[in-house]
Image (cartoon, rainbow, N blue to C red):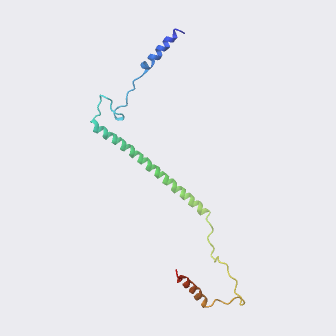
Amino acid sequence: MRRALPLLLLAAVLGPSAVQAQVAPYPYPYSYPQPGFPYPGGAPAAIADQHRYENERIRLQAQANAALARRLDAEAAQRRLTLEAARQATAAPAPSVHDLRPVAPPASPSTSPPPTASEPRRSLSEIDAWLDRPR
């Protein structure tokens, strides 16, 4: 046990430094250049490449959005046709041809006489008086 303890301590101290691996960076078009390896074309070319990659990303996103919009439009049109077909299958019956107002019984001679010609004038004069009232 006493012999294993120093070996464990030595492995713990030397382990991380000995085990650490150098990971190779991505090649040129996918990463920034490493120190000591300038970007081909200098800083303006690096900025132009960044803009080109960003424009490509935005264009692809716009194409995906347009495809989604077309798909949703097609689904909406299909759903609308389905609903219209269902409505036509259970459409309300056509309105009847006869008049829906109740038919008045024939007037008997014992009822009140028909209105005279002065009644409409009287109702119109009441309206005129109300419109001409002082305010």
Left or right: where does residue 78 sit relative to residue 23?
right
**Total numbered labels placed on residues in the image:** 0
* Front in this rendered view, residue 123 or 77: 123
Judge whether 118 appears above or below 69 on screen: below
Identify the residue shown where x is 29% and y is 31%: 38
Identify the residue shown where x is 57% and y is 60%: 85
Identify the residue shown where x is 49% and y is 12%: 7
Residue at the far left: name it: 41
Q: Quadrant of residue 128?
A: bottom right
Can you give x and y, in whole percent of width and height, for residue 89 in the image?
61, 62
* Front in this rendered view, residue 26 or 46: 46
Can you give x and y, in whole percent of width and height, for residue 17 in the image?
42, 19
Judge whether 92 appears above or below 128 on screen: above
Can you give x and y, in whole percent of width and height, for residue 79 in the image?
54, 56
Left or right: where does residue 25 sit relative to residue 11?
left
Can you give x and y, in whole percent of width and height, for residue 49 in the image?
32, 39
Residue at the far front: name it: 135
Judge whether 14 appears above or below 78 on screen: above
Q: In which quarter of the image is residue 121?
A: bottom right
Residue at the far right: name it: 110
Identify the residue shown where x is 58% and y is 85%: 126
Left or right: where does residue 3 sit relative to residue 20?
right
